[in-house]
Amino acid sequence: MTYLFLAMLAMLAGCASGPRQPGEVAESVAHQQAEEALLEERFQQAVALMESGEADAAESRFVQLVKDYPGHTGPLVNLGILAFQNGDFENATAYFKSALDLDSGHPVALNQLGVIARMQGNFDAAEQNYREALRVEPDYLPAMLNLAFLLDIYLGRPAEALALYERYQSLAEEPDPRIEDWIFDTRNRL
């Protein structure tokens, strides 16, 4: 008897989750697109506040976005950047790691964790984070330049750094004269 009841219950559950009608699918897609557009608008407003130096207002907006859209990495990464800019490496690290929990290959979060590790003297962790960012996004210029600096200045591996400096220059929209100087200096040291 219990088997029959369970079979009937399973059949009813299947009916409730059966195929949607075309109108329901279109409505669901439209709702999802509207939510994404709202998220993007609110996110851009928070970024604009951040870029204009209104860090407290930006932080409030990003915190609210994290609450309203917990599956998105952008607000977490920007909260990490704000914490980093305030010298709060502990919270910055926590935000970047939370972003990586959602997207283990987030190049900005990986790069920023590398910067924090380098500043704390943990050069192995810094190198690992920069290399992981470049593995995920091979042309991510901030991680490329940070890895070059780390290899050149902190780890005494100028030959490896030179290749990264040159690659950076070849990919940059506008060549950076400072990088040209570093390339020249690195070649002379080799």
Image (cartoon, rainbow, N blue to C red):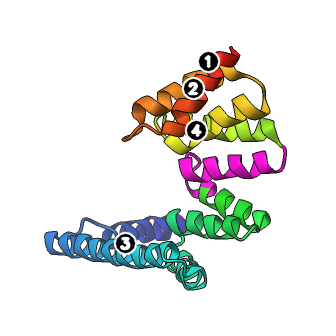
Residue topped by disc 2: 183
Q: Is residue 46 visible?
A: yes
Start-end of magenta stretch: 100-121
Residue topped by disc 1: 187
Magenta stretch encompasses residue 77? no
Q: CA distance from mark 4 to mark 2?
A: 12 Å
Q: Is label 3 in contact with label 1 (beta carbons under 8 Å)?
A: no
- Residue 137: x percent and y percent? 48, 38
Q: Is residue 106 visible?
A: no
Q: Residues within 10 Å of mark 3 (few under 14, many from 20)?
A: few
Q: CA distance from mark 3 to mark 4?
A: 29 Å
Q: Nearer the viewer, residue 11 or 54?
A: 54
Q: Amino acid at mark 2?
A: Ile
Side of 67 where 22 appears, left or right:
left
Label 1: which secondary element: helix
- Residue 106: x percent and y percent? 55, 50
- The circle on residue 128 is none
Q: Earlier in the sequence, mark 3 or mark 2?
A: 3
Q: CA distance from mark 3 to mark 1?
A: 45 Å
Side of 8 where 27 appears, left or right:
left
Residue topped by disc 4: 145
